[in-house]
Amino acid sequence: MKGIVPLGILSPALVFMIACSALAADPFANIQERDRQFRMEKRVGELQREQQIDLLRSQQDSARLQQELDRMRNRQTEDNDRQGEIQRLQQQLNQVQNEQQLKRLQSDQRLQQLLQLQQSSDPVRRERQASELGREQQIERLQRQLTLDQIDEALRQMLNRR
């Protein structure tokens, strides 16, 4: 009982120092922060992989459509109506490819910002930005796929009209 000192005897500054050291000595604080950082790194890695996979798929789809456009352009050199339609589809495909390149650069910048935010002490902000980037990537992927599908459908219709 001699080792226990009543709090009334201790000075307020000493009580404050003891409370601060007790909070700082939380054995799980460091583990929780490392866990948060690990989860964030994992999420950023997932976003990067999704972006790379999406880029490869989109490049494959664009290449397939480009080959089909080239094939149709070579077959139908005499038909001006179809040449105009082929040219319109080519421009649309070029636009999709340019937009994809711009969006990829923007996503790269956002991923870099997320990596820099990992050093931040605001885990809610980091997680919110990671979620926003994931949603934006998904929306962009769906929009691009819709446009590529529309080009593909127009090509099929042109082939069926022959």
Image (tube, rainbow, N blue to C red):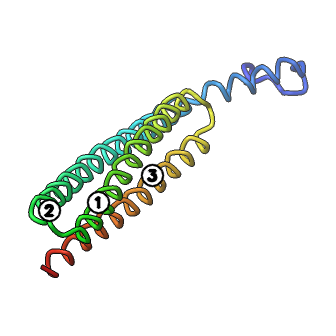
Instruction: Describe the element under mark 1 as helix, strand or loop.
Output: helix
Q: Find the distance from the CA under tag 2 to the CA under tag 3.
A: 44 Å
Label 3 – label 1 distance at C-alpha: 34 Å
In this rendering, which labeled residue sits more in front, label 1 or label 2?
2
Vertical order, 124 against 78 (above or below): above
Can you say which quadrant of the picture contains the C terminus?
bottom left
Q: Measured along the vertical axis of the image, is residue 16 above or below residue 150?
A: above
Mark 1–mark 2 Cα distance, whole angstroms, equals 12 Å
Residue under pointer 2: 77
Q: Where is residue 141 in the image (x, y as percent from the top left)?
A: 37, 57
Q: Nearer the viewer, residue 32 or 88?
A: 88
> Which residue carries the number 3 mark?
134
Quadrant of res 67:
bottom left
Q: In this view, does 70 lie to the left or right of 51?
A: left
User: x and y percent of residue 81 in the render?
Assistant: 26, 71
The earlier-in-sequence mark between 2 and 3 is: 2
Q: Which quarter of the figure has residue 4? A: top right
* Amino acid type, callout 1: Gln
In the picture, the disc for residue 14 is none
Q: How crowded is mark 1: few (under 14 residues within 10 Å), some or many (20 or more)?
A: some
**Image position, residue 161 (x, y; %):** 16, 81
Which comes sooner in the sequence, label 1 or label 2?
2
On the picture, is 27 further left or further right than 71?
A: right
Q: Name the residue under label 1.
A: 87
Camera-near label (3 vs 1) is: 1
Describe the element under mark 3 as helix, strand or loop: helix
Amino acid type at image mark 3? Gly
Q: Residues within 10 Å of mark 2 (few under 14, many from 20)?
A: few
Residue in the image at 55% along x and 32% along y: 117
